[in-house]
Image (cartoon, rainbow, N blue to C red):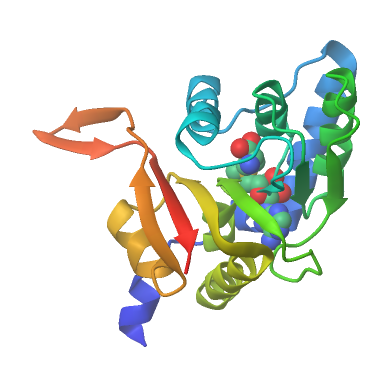
Amino acid sequence: MAEQENEELASSDLGTLDFWEHAYAQELDNFRDHGDVGEIWFGAANSRKIVRWIATKLDLNKECDKIIDVGCGNAMTLVELAKEGFANLMGVDYSQKAVNLARMILNDNNLSNVKLEVCDILNNTLPHDFKLVHDKGTYDAISLSPEDPTVKRQKYIENIHRILLPKGYLVLTSCNWTKEELLKHFTNYFEFESQLPTDTFQFGGQTGNVVTQLVFRKK
Ligand SMILES: C[S@@+](CC[C@H](N)C(=O)[O-])C[C@H]1O[C@@H](n2cnc3c(N)ncnc32)[C@H](O)[C@@H]1O
């Protein structure tokens, strides 16, 4: 038991709906005031890199294949995916305010065809026909939950597995877990496919990744 507890991250406000509702209330005000889309988690260049990777390295039909961004926040990844020509896009977030912001930003980009839904990925009735799930920072946020993070992480993995088509892709970006840790969490349900190159830094003679970006395929 003690060993399992040690495998969890220290809990944080970022693991609560309250935190995100407050954060997106502020970002909604900013967007209305001066058109600022808010935080691009892990940076805009990084976000574009993932989208380019999805568009060029994965076996996808841009017209038909359904792509869902779980914990889509302000929907900027969906905007980038649409710019790459993906036509069957959906975003979900458990924060109503995030979805309100996402809708305004999508409309501003003439992307009212992108579907949006308020949805807790841990407890959802989403269809089971997605070819790709994109997650940037949402598994991280769930991992920081002050209550039952082990149970929630497991539920997340099972739910993502369920909504994907056979051999569907999970493209995951994390700043809290290493590649080795993510492989340990996911490989009962997913096969590891590839790792995106990440910017690394040196500290005390050791090189470490800033973020871990992995592509898995549903088993
Ligand atoms: C670090 S932010 C990343 C937002 C977005 N993916 C991005 O890259 O800008 C984490 C997001 O996950 C959402 N989130 C956290 N737990 C969730 C859950 N159980 N179901 C759906 N969304 C969740 C939060 O509301 C927040 O928008």
Is 61 left, or right, of 110 in this rendering? left
Q: Residue at x 86, y 51 (%)?
A: 117
Q: Residue at x 34, y 68 (%)?
A: 184
- Could you tell me which quadrant the N terminus lies in? bottom left
Q: Count every numbered label the image shows and give the total.
A: 0
Is 77 left, or right, of 136 in this rendering? right
Is 19 left, or right, of 113 in this rendering? left
Q: Residue at x 17, y 32 (%)?
A: 203
- Quadrant location of residue 125? bottom right
Q: Position of residue 28 (x, y in %)?
A: 84, 29
Q: Position of residue 109 (x, y in %)?
A: 83, 19
- Quadrant location of residue 148? bottom right
Q: Residue at x 91, y 30 (%)?
A: 112
Question: From this viewpoint, which residue is outermost toward the top?
Answer: 34
Question: From this viewpoint, which residue is outermost toward the bottom?
Answer: 1
Comparing 19 with 111, the one in front is: 111
- Residue 88, can we see it? yes
